[in-house]
Image (cartoon, rainbow, N blue to C red):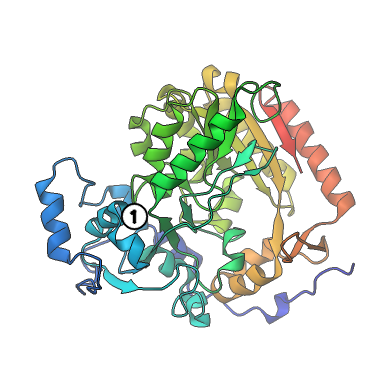
């Protein structure tokens, strides 16, 4: 199969400097307030005054005031909501959390022409993630086998993300915008998982996912740490798994949310901090926590009762990539205490990119594509769902995986490698 065409010569200049992309995650100032538009009243959702009144009368309700972390990432100005999601208990909590956001009723969280069908949103890619939220009801509750980092992929409580990693696979099917969609029927998701866990019984044989517990990835299409800034969905999942002795929750994250330290997971939730060389992350991991902060947080999360693992991903092949990864591994070795090292495991994932996402990135962050779209190194690959993906050529990819194994053995020999591909 021929390599993908090289569109780098067609690339337009950045719509705004990279520093502006990074600074978009800084705290909101008084010169940039929330919109004062009142939520649109539909047949079901509450008015702003009703939401504020309920939040004030219930001291245990979900807090109306944003945390500093939420304020840094989220400036929600409009909420697209399915009616059933808006009137649900979880939906009401979220609407109370953003009382000044404009509420827009939609028939389906998947089909929002103004959002997903609007090509002009590419130029506002990061801003849409900060200012827009979608509330929906998850219809399909299917747990499917995995066998890599988890035994099972659980039906997620969200889709999309407020962060803007240039290589993320989630927006490939969502059109020209990819903000967070929160599914408000988390109670049904948990009930489904409880039945599934019970059906499995005890794990008979150890495997690469875990020696004793069935591991469920609960954040395949989002980041649970960021979701926890919006609602209690992540907290509800962590609380559920701590009562199931034969199972563990697992999710990968690029965001350090220290509010999660208070949830007492009792060893039943595995958090996987995704890391890459900081110089790559600065260009590719837009609106995320800095890599050194993710590494430094590992000890605190372990002490709080989480199992702490790592994702070494994506590995982007560029000049001096080996030296950059060696430096990162040495940093892990220097910073992490013995207790973290004793239980740590990792996954190595080389970059897979996508033609459609490449075209979107050219519209908002073309500098990222200078690293991600390398036709001279990549080959086309049709995915199982029909996407036109590209990955590093077979011989090159195999050699890079072997080199990463050697670097881990040399600089972080304590790090168990679950798999690499």
Classify residue 83 as left or right of residue 220: left
Instruction: Determine whether the residue tagged by mark 1 lies in a helix, strand or loop.
Output: helix
Q: Nearer the viewer, residue 335 or 352?
A: 352
Above or below — where is 61 with respect to 243?
A: below
- Image quadrant holding the N terminus, namely bottom right
Q: Position of residue 389 (x, y in %)?
A: 74, 63
- On the image, the x and y values in percent for residue 358 come to 66, 69
**Image quadrant of residue 405?**
top right
**Residue wearing tag 1:** 72
Residue 310 rendering spot, x and y as whole percentages: 59, 35
Nearest the viewer among 129 and 12 is 129
Which quarter of the image is occupied by the C terminus? top right
* Res 74 seen here: yes
**In this rendering, would 64 be left or right of 16?**
left
Place of residue 194 in the rendered image (x, y in percent of width and height, measured from the top left) = 49, 35
**Residue at left offset 85%, top offset 45%:** 398
Left or right of residue 35, residue 174 in this image: right
Between 9 and 125, the one nearer to me in the picture: 125
Q: Is residue 173 above or below residue 145?
A: below
Residue at image position (47%, 33%) is 296
Say if 406 sits above or below 114 in the image: above
Residue 271 visible in rendering? no
Disc 1 crowd, CA 10 A, few/some/many (<14, 14-19, 20+): some
Q: Nearer the viewer, residue 189 or 344?
A: 189
- Total count of labels: 1
């Amino acid at each position: 199969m021929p390599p993908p065409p090289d569109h780098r010569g067609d690339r337009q200049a950045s719509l705004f400097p990279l520093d502006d992309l990074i600074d978009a995650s800084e705290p909101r100032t008084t010169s940039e307030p929330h919109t004062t538009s009142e939520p649109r009243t539909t047949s079901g959702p509450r008015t702003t005054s009703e939401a504020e009144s309920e939040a004030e009368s219930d001291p245990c309700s979900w807090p109306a005031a944003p945390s500093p972390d939420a304020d840094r990432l989220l400036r929600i100005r409009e909420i697209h909501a399915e009616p059933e999601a808006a009137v649900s208990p979880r939906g009401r909590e979220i609407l109370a959390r953003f009382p000044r956001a404009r509420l827009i009723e939609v028939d389906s969280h998947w089909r929002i022409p103004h959002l997903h069908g609007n090509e002009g949103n590419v130029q506002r890619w990061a801003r849409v993630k900060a200012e827009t939220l979608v509330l929906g009801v998850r219809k399909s509750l299917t747990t499917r086998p995995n066998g890599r980092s988890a035994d099972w992929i659980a039906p997620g409580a969200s889709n999309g993300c407020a962060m803007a990693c240039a290589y993320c696979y989630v927006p490939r099917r969502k059109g020209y915008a990819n903000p967070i969609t929160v599914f408000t029927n988390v109670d049904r998701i948990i009930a489904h998982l409880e039945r599934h866990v019970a059906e499995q019984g005890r794990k008979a044989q150890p495997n690469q996912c875990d020696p004793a517990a069935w591991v469920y990835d609960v954040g395949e299409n989002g980041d649970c740490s960021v979701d926890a800034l919006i609602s209690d969905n992540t907290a509800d999942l962590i609380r559920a798994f701590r009562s199931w002795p034969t199972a563990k929750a697992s999710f990968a994250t690029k965001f350090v949310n220290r509010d999660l330290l208070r949830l007492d997971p009792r060893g039943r939730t595995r958090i996987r901090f995704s890391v890459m060389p900081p110089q790559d992350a600065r260009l590719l991991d837009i609106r995320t926590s800095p890599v050194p902060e993710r590494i430094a947080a590992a000890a605190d999360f372990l002490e709080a009762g989480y199992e702490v693992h790592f994702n070494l991903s994506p590995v982007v092949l560029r000049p001096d990539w080996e030296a950059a990864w060696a430096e990162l591994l040495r940093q892990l070795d220097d910073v992490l205490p013995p207790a973290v090292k004793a239980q740590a495991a990792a996954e190595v994932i080389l970059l897979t990119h996508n033609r459609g996402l490449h075209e979107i990135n050219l519209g908002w962050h073309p500098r990222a594509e200078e690293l991600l779209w390398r036709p001279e190194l990549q080959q086309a690959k049709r995915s199982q769902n029909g996407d036109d993906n590209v990955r590093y050529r077979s011989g090159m990819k195999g050699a890079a995986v072997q080199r990463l194994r050697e670097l881990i053995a040399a600089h972080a020999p304590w790090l168990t490698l679950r798999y690499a591909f």
